[in-house]
Amino acid sequence: MTTETFDANQRDARFKYEVVRQPGGENLLLCYACGTCTAGCPVSQIDPEFNPRKIIRQILLGMRREVLSSPVIWRCAQCHACTAKCPQNVRFREIMRALWQLAVAHGFAPPHMLERIDELARLTHKARRDLVAEFVRNPEAFELLKEKCEHLTQTTDQA
Amino acid sequence: MKTTQQTPKGSKVGAALVIGGGIAGIQAALDLADSGQKVYLLERAPSIGGNMARLDKTFPTNDCSMCILSPKVVECGRHLNIETIAWAELEGVTGTVGNFTARIRRRARYVDSEKCTGCGECATVCPVQMPSEFDAQLGTRKAIFRPCPQAYPNTFVIDKRGRAPCRVGCPAGININGYVALTAMGKFDEALDLILDTVPLPGVLGRVCDHPCESVCHLGTLDAEPVAICAIKRFLADRRRLGGQRRMPQPSQPKEKRQKVAIIGAGPAGLTAARELARKGYQPTIFEAESQPGGMLSWGIPAYRLPREVLHHEIEDILAEGVELQLNCRFGSDITRDELTRRGYKALILAIGAQAGAPLGIENENLEGVYDSIRFLRQVNAGRPVAVGRRVTVIGGGNSAIDAARTALRLGAEQVTIVYRRTRTEMPAIPLEIKAAEEEGVRLELLAAPVRLHGIEGRVSRLECIRMRPGAPDASGRRAPVPVPRSEFFIETDTVISAIGQKVVMPDDPEFQKLQRRHGGTIQARPETCATDIPGVFAIGDAVTGPRSVIEAIAEGRKAAHAVDCYLRGVPFEPLPRVTRDQIVDHPPRADQSERPAPRRSAPELPVEERRRGFTEVEATLSEEDAVAEAQRCLRCAVCSECLACVRFCKAQAIRHDQEDVIEEINVGSIVVVPGFEEYHSTLKYDFGYSRFPDVVSSLEFERILSASGPFGGHVQRPSDGREPGRIAFLQCVGSRDLACRNDYCSSVCCMYAIKEAVIAKEHSRGLDVTIFFMDMRAFGKDFDKYYERARSEYGVRFVRARVSDVRQQNGQLILRYAPDTGGTCEEPFDMVVLSVGLQPPTGVRELASKLGVRTDKHGFMLTDPLNPLHTSRPGIFVGGPASAPKDIPETVVQASGAAAEVARLLSEVRNTLTVKAQFPPERDVSSVPPRIGVFVCHCGINIGGVVNVPAVAEYALTLPHVVHAEHNLYTCSQDTQDHIRAVILEKNINRVVVASCSPRTHEPLFQQTLRQAGLNPHLFVMANIRDQCSWAHLHEPEAATQKARDLVRMAAAKAALTVPLRSSTVPVIRQALVIGGGTAGMTAALAIADQGYHVCLVERDARLGGNLRDLPTGFEDQDLRAMLKNLIAKVKAHANIRVLTETTVVEVQGFVGNFTSKLSNGEEYRHGVAIIATGASEYQPREYLYGEDRRIITQRQLSQQLAAGNFPGLPPACVVMIQCVGSRTAEHPYCSRVCCTRAVKNAAQIKEHHPETEVIILYRDMRTYGFQERHYQRARELGVLFIRFDADRPPILTGGPRLDLSVFEPLLQTELHFHPDLVVLSTGIVSSAEDNDRLAKLFKVPLNDDGFFLEAHAKLRPVEFATEGVYLAGLAHGPKNLSECIAQALAAAARAGTVLAKDEIETSATIAEVLPDRCVACGLCTQICAYNAISLELQRIGKEERVFAKVNPALCKGCGACVAGCRSGALNLAGFSDKQILAEIAQL
């Protein structure tokens, strides 16, 4: 039945440790491949290509390039279903974030993804700059905002 | 407190305490008692048996769990030296090893175990039904119950949980939950009688009581209305009254106290006091000033609430109990105290009530048309019409005000207004009454107070009021009303009725005028004794308390009667037992939380327009259906309702509702703790839907569903709708291997029990589809893999390797989601889901551990050491079974026996110091006298007597030949009947006994013992089962059943006449043991036997002791095995009782238990009573994966040695691949070797710890790191070991060459992976030493299994012994296992051996086969038939003839009779069951 083969030479045995060292990747190694994450994943329901168990497997086997360059990893909805159901506390949602970090840092992210990230960074920067400008022009607004923020913190604290 | 024995401090005590009465406790108790220790077996539940009693079947043999357990339970229960203390708890332990003092709390059973015969009649009549714990809440039991019919002790127990709030809330303490429970069962007469036991006037109370009970009913806190207690009471009273029944005859009253007591006032308080006094045997007389009895009931309460016929009827009932009533006799004027004293009245109770209305205290109160409510109602109720006019105003907010208002309406008033100064919620009247008044048209003027009255021509015309507002809270906690200035207003009115209070009118007697009065004018009497200042005069009711409710007046009456009784008897006053609020229980959890309580039922009411037309009763009585439904809503808070039905029906008079807990101290030398396990509470795994969806059940619940004695009678059905499921799914690892629920361990048993349950379910209904969702199939035990394979191939159980993520319910089906290995996700519907729940320590185990002073781990498992697996952290206290780690039954039994060995070696010098032997008088010689038969026929309560005419059967028995005595007994098995039987035997010189009762299985030994005590041989006894096979089977045919009972007795008597005394012989025991095999198991067993004081000969084939352990440097928990082995060998060699023979084998074995002679290869002969086979096994020598061809391929054992040596030879390898199941689970060796997975993960972890750069890959089929070893698996993963699963049909392929190439198919990625390992480690299996084993098996006549391992007598309950008695088994010779398991098993073998060695001689059974030599042709067929190797062909001289005959060895014969049936020449006879006897029985039919 088999088709593909995968040779040891293609593997990066240290890749799993690279993920483990990322914030969020710490519990990766606990996985015993039961598949609960996948069965409970709403994305997997509609997109069988997105298979959390398989992604973990690939990481553990050192398939660094395959994982980081895969468009599939960007489909995670970050809904927490996997984390909630996992019997080994692997926290797959956090692992996805770790993979994103690595994919971006090592240039594996697809161009349109990088574009979107750049766009987001640009817009954030612009918002920040606009805000500062506004406060410089209108110090009262700044005071008002500060007051609102304090009020907000208080109510959240109470909640 | 009772202390059993006293032993001088410091010296050892020859007794042991076993805590936990499951299979482990039973086994440990039996082993200890049989090896000469007195045993106390402590069990928390009402009976012993533990979880095993609840299982349906056991794997891998599919034996019925109860069938194999029950004989052990019976044996334990009957053992002279085991005291079973069930329904008890440990309070604490003091002392040290050898001499502990344990404090035990024997919880009250409320049933006298001496008297209870277990007939079960009490449970039949008990009205309180509860979910049965034994049936996993799927079935029900009663408040008085035993867990199951096979329970030992066979004593019932009452589940009492404090007091129900309703009963505490009732001022008179009526047993409310009792009569509600009886009503729910349809026992209306009993229910009413229960009320009448406490109070009279139930029909009155059922109408006018303000029912404080209902306001405290727990149902009210559950988002539901309280039970309509009051309406139920009324239903019960009306049913009897309208049914034309009078009261049932009262139990005979004491006649000795006939003093006269005068009661002044025939109100509820006076009536109650009089009735209670009459019941206590006094002569009460009530003196009533009015022309009618009833007091306020008659004058104050209108007829539309309390029809007069109800009142009169119930007063007649009171009078019928011996109460005299004098009407129109006003105390003080018509009769005086002096007169009463002269007439002989010894005491006087004032119950005169508060008969005058309180004045309003405002202007113009004496205008015409102004009444107080008392005067108004009295006039109306006396039938004197009152012209109220068109408009009536009533002042006040109590019941009296409402009564006046509603009465006024009925008299024709058009506008009735109630003026009350507070708010509606503060009105003291019953809310429903206020509502009814409003419905009828009464207007409420709240927050208004009268200021003055205005009149025209001396007649009232209007009432001036002022508005009020709530002010500050007053003393009563209510907000005191404050007038609002300038808010006066007027109410036009024709009549004003004030109902603002009542006053006491004192009798016209100077002495009584002087009585102390309280502020409000009420009489001062002592609150508890009701005594006034005048001796002999008591005061109660409204006259003392001020106006209160009827039920409070009745409570006062009860109190006074008690006080007067104490006074007249001259005894110190003891208050009536009163329940306090802190005794109130919370309601028990309801089985189905999701369902809301049913709505309250109510009786129909008269339409409003009809009500105003007259005084017809407004509210109807509940229908029978409604009353029962209403009673069934009761939550049964206190469980036992104390309705006392059990007391009435228990013919043995065994019920003791006043029993209390008893604290006891027992002195023991050692303690065995075996508290067992509890199933994981799967409610905590929300995703799996347990307790949300009724058809998601736990595996233990499913066991009960499968069980023929379970809630569904063994019919597999869904709890929700009773439908037979078509598809069942099992979910594995629920609460196991799950960090989310903090259970990081594997529960070891779930895989196998799930397969078993699947197989049994398929056997129940063949068309069933069963799927088991699992991660790793852990079939690691002996013959487990074969069972797994059979389940798949023979039974068609489907196995899916996936963990289900969640279960949801949809259209009556359960939808499971899972991700198959091959990718994607699936949804699949099932009809039923079984959660294979894990094991965890039972609730309360931490408390137990702290009382014992032993340490537990984070889960509550007791800590042990792998090399001393049965030792707790406290010396002298041992543990076994799932209390130390999850395990299945055989391992639990092994550990229990092992713990017994530890105790036995500890207490060997005080063996048999506290045990007793049965003592009997010498047997009478009956050989030369004709039979004189005594027949005892048992009623068994009503079990037999209710169907069979028992006296007629006994009478009939007297007509039978040889019968000289026949009688019938209520319970033939009760202790007093045993004494009686013994006396009758001696008195009438009886020499044969027949008992016609129940099953010989449970009761024959008891009666036989009675015979022995009467000096008769126990075999001069015959039992006829006229219960199980007669009265139970023919429940509805009493005539035919009686005839059958006669037949059965006739047959038994015919056999009895032919019985002869049978004698058992004894065989002396050679108190020496032969241990074969000098490995860990053999040495451990040898030491444990030698420590018990017996000589041991340890035979080892090799030149050195040590066995396999010599090659294993470290254990799973990093123990230094080399040091351990060195130490063990030194101990064995140094032991005075052990002789070690190396390079020696056994060549010949002769003899039987207690008496073996073995010839050894050194020419020596050794005589021994027992033998232990501990010959071990060896490592599989691989032929696969280039082993032996390439030095880079090694075994796991070799790797262990390399790692222990400190390093790899040369540089650490870059890549190590381990391959599991080499030589295990193959066609050649189709079993799991059990230890290889753990060994591999341990070694892999060790490599990673020292060489993190080395890549370690484990190729496995199922990771079988069971129990706590799962943590090693977890640790290996955390260290980065890579696990890749492969299927048996697609094993890894290893190719040699300069660079090794290993390819394996990775199922999750569906990819062929290639590795280039520097080292390949083969996890080789354990194989039996087939040739050696075969030779030994033949010598000892013991069997081997297909894999060449020795086959124990029973896979579950006799795991270390053979069917051949006196031969035991330990270690790898039995099958693969780890070191701790070997040690435990060796100890167990030593314990079992100890039970033989502890005896001087072995008593053989008397009912055994015997050879009739003149018929024996020596064909040898019997020798083949006998399963116990008890028959052999031997050259014998019998009489003059010397030739080969069959010979039965009495020490081995079990009396099964197979040889008798098989012998073609009729040369065999089974003593006690001779052809003659059996034919005589048949001839009687």
Image (tube, rainbow, N blue to C red):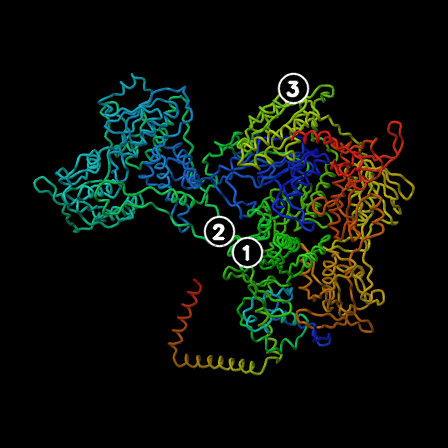
Point out the residue furthest to the right here: B1163
CA gap between label 1 and label 2 equals 13 Å
Locate the N terminus of chain B by quadrant.
top right
Q: Check disc 1 and report its element: helix, strand or loop.
A: strand
Upstream in the sequence, badge 3 or badge 1? Answer: 1
Label 2 amino acid?
A: Asp
Q: Pick whichever of labels 3 and 2 is earlier in the sequence.
A: 2
- Image position of B153 (left or right of B571): right
Q: Which mark is residue B592?
A: 2
Same-subunit check for callouts 3 and 1: yes
Outermost residue on the top side: it is: B342
Q: How many marks?
A: 3
Count neighbours of disc 1 (C-alpha within 10 A) and say few if under 14, some if 14 to 19, many if 20 or more.
many
Amino acid type, callout 3: Leu
**Neighbour class for label 2 at 10 Å: few (<14), some, many (≥20)?**
few
Q: Is residue A16 visible?
A: no
**Label 2: element kind:** loop
Q: Could you say which is closer to the camera, residue B513 or residue B967?
A: B967
**Does residue B648 show up?**
yes
Residue B929 shown left or right of residue B1333 in the figure: left
* CA distance separating discs 3 and 1: 62 Å
Secondary structure under badge 3? Answer: helix
Q: Are marks 1 and 2 on the same chain?
A: yes
Q: Could you say where residue B1221 lies in the image, as x and y percent from the top left?
A: 75, 61
Measured Cα–Cα span from mark 3 to mark 2: 60 Å
Q: In the image, what residue type sits under mark 1?
A: Val
Q: Is residue B590 above or below residue B556?
A: below
In the image, residue B213 above or below residue A12: above
Q: Which residue has dot 3 on it?
A: B986
Q: Which residue is mark 1?
A: B696
